[in-house]
Image (cartoon, rainbow, N blue to C red):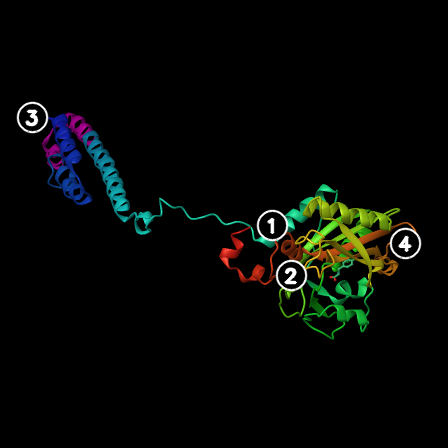
Amino acid sequence: MSDALDIDALVDEARSYIEAAQSTEEIRQMTANVSGKKSPIAEAHRALGGLDPEERKELGRRLHGARTTIEELIERRRAEITFEELTREMAGARIDLTEFIPGAIVAPPARGHLHLVSQTRDALEDVFVGMGFEVAEGPEIETDWFNFGALNIPPAHPARGMWDTFYLNLGSPESTLLRTHTSPVQIHLMEDAVVNGGLPIHAVMPGRCYRRDTPDARHLPVFHQIEGLVVDRGITFADLAGTIEVFTTAYFGPDIHSRLRPAYFPFTEPSAEFEVTCTICHGEGCRTCSMTGWIELGGCGMVDPAVFDAVGIDTDEWTGFAFGFGIDRCAQMRHQIADMRALIENDIRFLRQF
Ligand code: DAH
C-alpha cells in the first residue's frame, strides 16, 4: 500500500485546492477536505496500523511532514485572504469628503491672519526691541497693591478716580481687581530685579486692561496698553523725550513727531502727556485733533521716588523713566479707524482689510 500512496501528489493536490480558495468560508470547508478526518492524509494515517514496523516508521515520518506542509499552506492562504478581505472592506468604508463639498478642491479655504490689535502689538514690540528694550508680561488679575498701592496711589487717594475699576473682591485686605493699566507690570519687574539682581531694566510690557467705561468711538472697557520702563544710572528726562520721539517716527513715519505737555500721574514726577502729530491732517489742524494738529497718545514721566521706595530700589544710585499708551489707540490712529468699537465687533469685512 505504501508504494501505491504518492505523498507528493497528495500534497500537490492539497496545494491546488488551498490556492484556489477565495474566502474565509472556502478555506474552512477546504481545510476539512485536505486535512480533516476524511481526507486522504487521515486515511493514509489510519492505514499505518497494518504495516510492518519499519515501513510504518518511514511512512509515518513522511505523512507527518506532508501534514505539516499542508497546514502551513492553509495558514498562509488564510492570512492572505484575511488581509484581502480587510483591504476590500476598508476601501468600501472610505469616505471621500471632497465629494460632498462643492468646489472644495477648486477653492481651498482662505487663510486667516492676526487681528489688527495683535498686529499692532507686534509692530510696537518690534520698534522697541530694535531700540534695545526687552518684552515682559504680567497678570491681568492684580492685587490692590500692584495696581495702585505700590504706584503711589494709596486707598482713598483722589487719583483712584482716574481709573474706574472692576473689583473682584473689594474690601478684603488683599482685594483683587482687573488691572486698569499695564503700570503694575513695572512693579513686578522692579521687585523681581531687586530680588534677582536684575538692574538695570529696559523693558516694554504690552497687555490687556479693563475699565468700567461705556464703549464709545474712542474708549473700550477692555483695551490694550503698552508700558515702558527704564531704570538705570543717570537716566534723565532728556532720555525719556528722546525715546518717545524715536519711537514716534519709527512707528508712525518720518513726518510724525512727538511733544510732551505737563501732566499729573501719581507714579511719575515730573509727569507728562505725550502727543503726536495728528495722523489725519499731518499737523494742519482738523476736526479729529480739534484744530491743534496734535493727538494725545499716552502718559509718561520720571519714576517717582515713592515708587522706588515701595519696591526697595536705592534712589541715590538709580533713576528711571516710564511711559504707557494705548495699543488700540495706535491702531486707530495709524489706520484712521473712526470708531474703536469696530476692533471688538469681529465683523470679518472690517478685519480683512488689515
Ligand atoms: N498708567 C497710565 C494710564 O493708564 C499711563 C501712564 C502714565 C503710564 C504715565 C506710565 C506713566 O508709565 O509714566 O493712564
Picture residue at 21% right of the left edge, 31% below the top: 69
The reply to whether dot 1 and dot 3 touch (C-beta < 8 Å) is no
Answer few, some or many: residues within 10 Å of disc 1's Cα (few below 14, many 20 plus, some between 14 and 19).
some
Q: Earlier in the sequence, mark 4 or mark 2?
A: 2
Answer few, some or many: residues within 10 Å of disc 4's Cα (few below 14, many 20 plus, some between 14 and 19).
some
Q: Earlier in the sequence, mark 2 or mark 1?
A: 1
The amino acid at mark 3 is Ala
As rendered, which of 58 and 43 lies closer to the eye? 43
**Quadrant for the N terminus in the image:** top left
Q: Position of residue 72 (x, y in %)?
A: 24, 34
Q: CA distance from mark 4 to mark 2?
A: 33 Å
Q: CA distance from mark 1 to mark 3?
A: 92 Å
Mark 4 or 2: the one toward you: 2
The reply to whether dot 3 and dot 4 touch (C-beta < 8 Å) is no
Q: CA distance from mark 3 to mark 2?
A: 100 Å
Mark 1 or 4: the one toward you: 1
Vertical order, 349 against 145 (above or below): above
In this rendering, would 144 be left or right of 346?
right
As rendered, which of 314 and 298 lies closer to the eye? 298
Indicate yes or no whether the magenta region holds residue 273: no
Look at the numbered disc 1 and give the secondary structure of its residue.
helix
The amino acid at mark 2 is Phe
Magenta span: helix, strand or loop, mainly?
Answer: helix
Reading the image, the residue beneath label 2 is: 223
What's drawn in magenta, residue-wise? 42-64
The label on residue 4 is: 3
